[in-house]
Image (cartoon, rainbow, N blue to C red):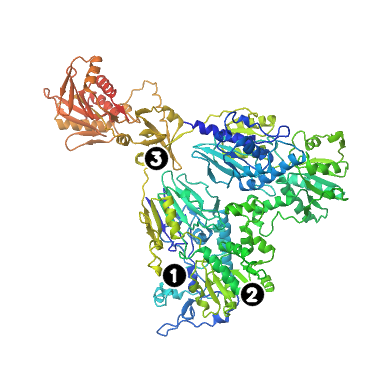
Amino acid sequence: MVLPAALTALLTLVLSAALLQFCLKRRFPDFSYITQNGRLTDFLDCVIISHFHLDHCGALPYFSEMVGYDGPIYMTHPTKAICPILLEDYRKITVDKKGETNFFTSQMIKDCMKKVVAVHLHQTVQVDEELEIKAYYAGHVLGAAMFQIKVGCESVVYTGDYNMTPDRHLGAAWIDKCRPDLLISESTYATTIRDSKRCRERDFLKKVHETVERGGKVLIPVFALGRAQELCILLETFWERMNLKAPIYFSTGLTEKANHYYKLFITWTNQKIRKTFVQRNMFEFKHIKAFDRAFADNPGPMVVFATPGMLHAGQSLQIFRKWAGNEKNMVIMPGYCVQGTVGHKILSGQRKLEMEGRQILEVKMQVEYMSFSAHADAKGIMQLIRQAEPRNVLLVHGEAKKMEFLKQKIEQEFHVSCYMPANGETTTIFTNPSIPVDISLGLLKRETAIGLLPDVKKPKLMHGTLIMKDNSFRLVSPEQALKELGLAEHQLRFTCRVHIQDPRKEHETVLRVYNHLKGVLKDYSVQHLPDGSITVESILIQATAHSEDQGTKVLLVSWTYQDEELGSYLTSLLKKGLPQSTS
Amino acid sequence: MKLCYCLSGHPTLPCNVLKFKSTTIMLDCGLDMTSTLNFLPLPLVQSPRLSKLPGWVLKDGSTFLDKELKECSGHVFVDSVPEFCLPETELLDLSTVDVILISNYHCMMALPYITEYTGFTGTVYATEPTVQIGRLLMEELVNSIERVPKAQSASMWKNKEVQRLLPAPLKDAVEVSMWRKCYTMPEVNAALSKIQLVGYSQKIELFGAVQVTPLSSGYALGSSNWIIQSHYEKVSYVSGSSLLTTHPQPMDQASLKNSDVLILTGLTQIPTANPDGMVGEFCSNLAMTVRNGGNVLVPCYPSGVIYDLLECLYQYIDSAGLSNVPFYFISPVANSSLEFSQIFAEWLCHNKQTKVYLPEPPFPHAELIQTNKLKHYPSIHGDFSNDFKQPCVVFTGHPSLRFGDVVHFMELWGKSSLNTVIFTEPDFSYLDALAPYQPLAMKCVYCPIDTRLNFIQVSKLLKEVQPLHVVCPEQYTQPPPTQSHRTDLMIDCQPPPMSYRRAEVLTLPYKRRYEKIEIMPELADSLVPLEIKPGISLATVSAVLHTKDNKHVLQLPPKPPQPPASKKRKRVSDDVPECKPLKPLLSGSIPVDQFVQTLEKHGFSDVKVEDTAKGHIVLLQEAETLIQIEEDSTHIICDNDEPLRVKLRDLVLKFLQKF
């Protein structure tokens, strides 16, 4: 008994959240996948944004203000705080710098954010009468969350991006054993089991240090929020420990603001930072200063964090072009780069780049890749599946080949179905929910009172009547069901005459019958009543002499329909006659 | 049966234990600190005045108590380390408590006594701000008592025979034998380590039987009311709630609806004072004193109302020309408290949240600190003594005036009528607090700010959420003793509230009738529903009941094992029927004419019908069988001819409905 309407909407809303991904070629997702005719608001119950990265929220104002959606949009407090700033930044780059038209405006971002409802971690938000959602900590970036979406006893968990190992500034994702019917997991690093974090950090510091020592400049393209803060903490502590003097700069005005968000939302960072923040706020940096464009031409070593992270535009690209020609310099790519970006090109080994105006840029500087971006690796994904114990897994956000490998691994280890649909593909997953009903306490107590310890050999059956009325289900005792419906019970009774050859007196016959039954029916309550009758449970047996034949006794066996089995058995047993008495 | 054990007599510092569906839940563990008012203050530096106080002499002249009791301006005080009045620990075995739910940081101060001394092994649930700020309050308490070691510990006066002879209020103090000294930091840490953090509207399952949920109560950072419910019963625990817009997130009232029982504690302690008016008076008294060259002392807790006071002053000081007056906040946890207040954006009211989104600190005291208008120090020693400039305003604890840095300022400033002490915390009677400092020249202003619900708000709330029953401390069912004519200062609802007092056990008045059970899909598939009336369908269910972790599940009965094919001679008892489903109940009636027609159709040719008083008798003469048919019963009386009986049975059943 599923709730088809709600369930469809439920799955649609999850996918819509996953769909809000911008790619460089076509800017916005094709929302007509959700509904061709009719308004999105009527079709979607809600929209969930897992974290502030633009590939998860970049299309939100377009979706809500240009396509048109007025329902609730859920995100955590830090996401709600940071999201509009990144959107505005994104808008500025696209419209003001690149001159794109048909893009959302500042006002649209504001209007869109008014539709946002902020949620706490672990808070159960009742979206409507049936649908509830709950956020779990996801690591990855400040405010990132995984969401459990639940209707009745069926549920889906959508992970967004998550990270199963704590880093310098964030904790590890965590979920309880919520046993969802479906877990939708990202699988960006489907097969990479990354070496230990410490090793990567040491490597990173070593490379930065060496370059600076030999007088080179280090460029680290980052996105303003997220990995940047982790690397800043790393360099800050290293500089302090090694007493280094080379300047570290952070480009864009966003940074200081960004650090401020980290200070105010310190409860979302890892335990160490939270514990020590009163003595020392880790996001107040001593060695890292704001960058000015003119500094790029300064002689001598320096380290610069610059946005954006994939070297596809803006300041990071400008600095890259200035420094690329010198082999003393180094660029460290700390995250994944989308195909087509300069970042992707240099990482795949290209050393001659065609820039705007057919200009060829020769890259002599060293190019390093350090995977610092905080996604769960294969080990992490498996760990999350172990935590949540889903009945089905669906992988998104990754490369097909790697996902295929992971899918097999998941199916082998957990014996659950795993899916990896392509964009635009529909996957149907069947659930088999049990049905919750209300049982009257009288009936339940009656049942549990009879046998507290279930007997394996003789499972106890309970008998009740299920009343279905206006979508409510109640299980009550048959007597109560009759009473509630205003019906009288119709009693069906049988009385069978069983003839027995026994010349003895009546009461002696009765005694023999009694002893016989007592011997056979060990598990039943057999009683000899003072008035000369016998009861077996609620079945009554009386003996009378035959009116014509004194040697024959007539046993009247009387039972109701409810005791049919036993009554029928008794008559056939008595019909066989009594055993020869030993006396 | 639901029981409520009431362990505290203080209505704003409650401690109740609820027995609910096989779980034992403690609601808050408040520590009654008014007991400390019976003690002499603990001065930071030797106070000649206090040490010269005369010992107390009984009327008959005996002086055996003069080491323990001192007299000051007609009041008698115990000269010993202050002690607190614990919740009742004898009423029930506290090691059986499964969980403790904390509603706000003021209501958890007895936690170490409960978790460390009673064999408690359960879990404590509280929100993150509650735990963090609660820790600060405990730290301050422990610190201010431990740093002034007192050689003497008085106990003779507690002897029942002796206590009888003492003057009031010592004579009337309750349970003095149960009063305890302050806990230590290791005990605080151990107690706090048992806390599990929760968020508002988080549903927490207890043993599969009960669900508890904290809701915003609007009173303090992270303060919560709790819903304790099963599928069919709902108990709301309302403790320390506020409808005023101060800094915390607003109170969630809607979720309290449909409660069977609402336990109401923590109402305002000053029902006649309007908090807004009090804040105004606070500001004007402060300004007047400072303008006249005097100092202002504000005894306070390190968190809570102080944030609101600082915010008011932030707006007020420039217009009142106080920009050059230094504000000092002195507490071992002052810095932590100010820092922590800025990082709980998610627990703040909407306005403050919006500021964080900018991003700016939610409380303006950040700016006061930046501009050096507000300075904070861990104690009067160290940096403070160098920076100290008068006239000034000092915020410091403890509001009881019995320990903490406030004692020093009372001794320092008490002799001058230029100075003012302004009481804002409502937990202690200001006259009692001042008693050991009398005679006093300094001005005393009483501006209690208690934002918790008043009786008008309570009656509005109760009308709104409509609980079936209200349970509250006895103090709320009668007007305050000092204003016995004010019948508006009590809870008025229908049915009248059930009241409790310390060490009482209440039986909560409701009974549940249903329980949730799950029908497994395989069993559901096998059910055959029958429409009995339009819109009402019935299905008979015969199933195996499984109960695990307090969850009930119905499964298909197992298939009977195939009888072994061997030809082994069967014993009689092998045939004894077992584990057969009970037959359903029957309903309906049998129309005789149709029944007879059916009989004839099935080959009975000699059917005779006789009318009786209540119905009919159908006779099958050849088979010597008689069928009595009445409105609500049918009785088949026959010879032992099983095939015939079964045939007749099935014919009868055709006319009846099964349940």
x, y percent for residue A255 = 73, 50
Contact (Cβ within 8 Å) of mark 2 with mark 3: no
At label 3, the amino acid type is Leu
Real-space CA distance between mark 1 and mark 3, rounded to the nearest whole angstrom? 49 Å
Foreground: disc 1 or disc 3 = 1
**In the image shown, does A540 or B428 lie closer to the viewer?**
B428
Q: Is residue B431 visible?
A: yes
Check disc 3 and report its element: helix, strand or loop.
loop
| Residue indicated by mark 3 | A453
Q: Is residue B53 above or below residue B616?
A: below
**In the image shown, does B482 or A166 lie closer to the viewer?**
B482
Left or right, residue A328 beside residue B452 = right
Check disc 2 and report its element: helix, strand or loop.
loop
Quadrant of the rendered structure where residue A519 is?
top left
At label 1, the amino acid type is Val
Q: Is residue B116 visible?
A: no
The chain containing the residue under callout 2 comes to B
Q: Residue at x 46, y 50 (%)?
A: B256
Q: Is residue A298 above or below residue B648?
A: below
At label 2, the amino acid type is Pro
| Residue indicated by mark 2 | B391
